[in-house]
Amino acid sequence: MKVLVPVKRVVDYNVKVRVKSDGTGVELSHVKMSMNPFDEIAVEEALRLKEAGIATEVVAVSIGPAQASETLRTALAMGADRGILVKTDATVEPLAVAKILKAVIAEEAPRLVILGKQAIDDDANQTGQMLAALLGWGQGTFASKVVIDGDAVLVTREIDGGAQTVRLALPAIVTTDLRLNEPRYASLPNIMKAKKKPIDEKSPDGYGVDVAPRLKVLTTAEPAGRKAGVKVGSVSELVAKLKDEAGVI
Amino acid sequence: MQTYQPPLRDMRFVLHELHGSDTLKDMKGCEDITPDLIDAVLEEAGKLVTEVLAPLNPVGDAEGCKYENGVVRTPTGFKDAYKTYVEGGWNGIACDPEWGGQGLPASVTKFIEEMMCSANLSFGLYPGLTHGAYQAIVSHAPQELKERFLPKMVEGIWSGTMCLTEPHCGTDLGLLRTKAEPQGDGSYKITGSKIFISAGEHDLTENIIHLVLARLPNAPKGVKGISLFLVPKFLPKEDGTPGPRNGVLCTGIEHKMGLNGSATCQLSLDEATGWLVGEPHKGMRAMFTMMNSERLSVGTQGLGVGEAAYQSAVAYAKERLQGRALTGAKYPDKPADPIIVHPDVRRSLMTMRAYNEGCRALSGWVARNLDLMERSNDPEERQNAEDFTALMTPIVKALFTDLGFTNASMGVQVYGGHGYIRDHGVEQYVRDARIAMIYEGTNGVQALDLVGRKLPAHMGRYLRSFFHPVLAYIDSKLDDENLGPLVGPLGKAFGALQLATGHIAEKGLKDPDEAGAAATDYLRLFGLVALGYMWVRMADVAFQKRAEANGEAAFYEAKIATARFYIDRLLPEVAGLWGSIKAGKAAMMALDDAAF
């Protein structure tokens, strides 16, 4: 069984993000970029399936600028078998990503696609769902456990108020949540080997996908600074304020 | 709070921009070592040290190692961290692929070593010792021993030690008493006691391979009668797995000033089975293969701790609000300004930064020569690199560890009273850094090595490997518009180094005490000039790059500003050192022993 893992290059989670002075977005030049942490979990899950003898090949795909090949190398260093870079310098919205992935899937014919539930840059949480809809496949989102059962996959989902297990016929889409697994560190020998693993380069045009944005960003602004608080003199004053002013009790 | 992120940008600067990494792939065994591979390796190593090793640094300090009935337990978490480290293949990073290593050049591995020292010095000692033992075995042991022991040591499931010191013999190994009796089957029975053995006993690996200095029967007295033996904790069975327990027992561990997570053991050898490594009576030579590389590594420890202290100090200086800037409030919206506005705090931070980045650059230069020495195809280049490495080894060891301790202490100063209490973790750096000035040959011994061995070797040939390129560089840049103000003072300091060298050569020849009295000041003078040279060269690169730096101009501007700080504020120490050297031994040696 082939498993496809889409991975996104995003601002590293340690970076303190700054808004560009003209408000068109956040500053991305010379900030540290890494693989979206949810996608790392996706790569890890695919690798575990391979180690369990269930998956036969793990293919990582990334859509983005030339530097996204570094993100693919990270996936290859973790243990993925090969990479596909769909190269574009444009801003690619979730719908366009889903369309490109659909085209990649048509070529690669994976039985399972595992991707992060959302990317930590725009937090859209849409790509997996859109992709499932475009393909007409079942979707198991926010997965905290994935078990392959013959021609189906059992996905335990994190939902409000607990967990829900769904059974999906393969092929299917799974999006990962934090508790699914703890991604491995790439081993040194695998980092060295990753250099020799192939990365195919493709383009959105080649797949016939128009990536032009459907949404318009009006402005990007820092959240308002925290206002100074007040000191209350007693517990009863606090309770009164919570009741009358804040209206929370 | 202990704060550490690997200084990857600065490492890339040193590796790629200052010393040029594109030529690495021309060296033997480095065909695949391209800049992007190096970056990927450094990045992943950085992840491992910050996420796995750094959190255990305060834990190891607070808990220390536990000794009970011959068994040593490392602090909570060390075992799991070691497993992660070994499974990632990092233990063999610098080892020969023939024995299962990755064969990466020192130019790359030195930075990973530095990161480990910054994140958790105590932890780093365990694999560090294994690597030292690996080198002695690779260079001197017979093939059969190599095949039996090296693959598991490279993998990291067995570890190594160096057993030199005995209760009555530290610096003077000629006094060594441990005995080795030949058994007629190629093995020896070794008996004696050893102390201060780092990683001598622990629970991280299934076997521990000791390299032990001992005397054969009828061996000549002094250092010329010492041989080196390989003594495993468990004797390997035919299938290579650990077999019966050998007669080497841990009888206790030391309670130390710092480095608490590292087990410093007393070992008792009672007819322990061992095998000879290298030739009889030539143990010191074999041991020195290991010691020279260990000395460079100890220098890296100084740099590593210094960097962690710097980052922790910067974090605090930016958040601690106290008082107002001398020139008026800089952050009027806050109840007070962060202390980073104060010139004296800046003095500390800039000093730490200038020392650290200077040492990193010099470390990169020495590492490049380590690679050339082993991997260049040109015999002349190999020889020159060997000369340079021999010359710089005592300087790197002593200067880096002196500065590392200075930096750790300055870090505490920036924290004020909060640095002196344990909770903030920065006093640990002071205690941990202190040992690096002592072990692997005290810094006083390093200075004697420089003055007594390295300067006179081959009629001063080693010096040429440093003096010639520095002199040529200074001459070529004197009229440079940007660099002129930096090159002038460097030229003056270099002049003082030349004078001091001549002075010691002349006086020391007549009276060894004169050389001894000048040695420590001379080593520091030499080291500060070497850092000065690195700083001017870094500024040189920064001036060239800042124009086309799109978005990174701030990095290069900071380099240039730090270069100016070093040249203007730190390099002048050279004049004082030269003054002390000139004064000679008279006042130092004047008192009778009884007058103390």
Image: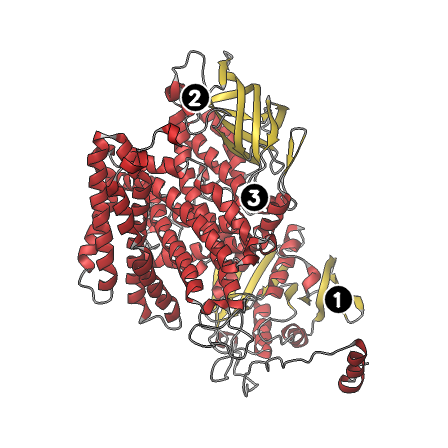
Amino acid type, residue under disc 3 in the picture: Val
Front residue (pair B110, B416): B416
Can you tell which mark lies on residue B175? 2
Regarding mark 3 in the picture, which secondary structure is present there? helix
Image quarter for residue A183?
A: bottom right
Residue at mark 3 shares a chain with residue at mark 2 = yes
- Residue at the outermost front position: B595
Q: Residue at x 47, y 47 (%)?
A: B113
Front residue (pair A194, B328): B328
- Answer above or below: position of B448 versus A106: above
Can you tell which mark lies on residue A157? 1
Front residue (pair B579, A9): B579
Q: Position of residue B251 (x, y in %)?
A: 61, 27
Regarding mark 1 in the picture, which secondary structure is present there? strand
Disc 2 versus disc 1: distance between alpha carbons?
Answer: 70 Å
Mark 3–mark 1 contact, CB under 8 Å?
Answer: no
Q: Quadrant of the C terminus of chain B?
A: top left
Q: Which numbered disc, 2 or 1, marks the residue closer to the eye?
A: 2
Can you tell which mark lies on residue B488? none
Q: Residue at x 68, y 65 (%)?
A: A177
Image quarter for residue B17?
A: bottom left
Front residue (pair B7, A81): B7
Mark 2 is surrounded, within 10 Å at the Cα level, by few (under 14), some (14 to 19) or many (20 or more) other residues, namely some
Marked residue chain, label 3: B
Marked residue chain, label 1: A
Q: Residue at x 39, y 70 (%)?
A: B554
Left or right, B221 with respect to B230, comes to left
Q: Is residue A240 visible?
A: yes
Residue on which disc 3 sits: B86
Q: Quadrant of the N terminus of chain B?
A: bottom right
Mark sitting earlier along the chain (3/2): 3
Amino acid type, residue under disc 1 in the picture: Arg
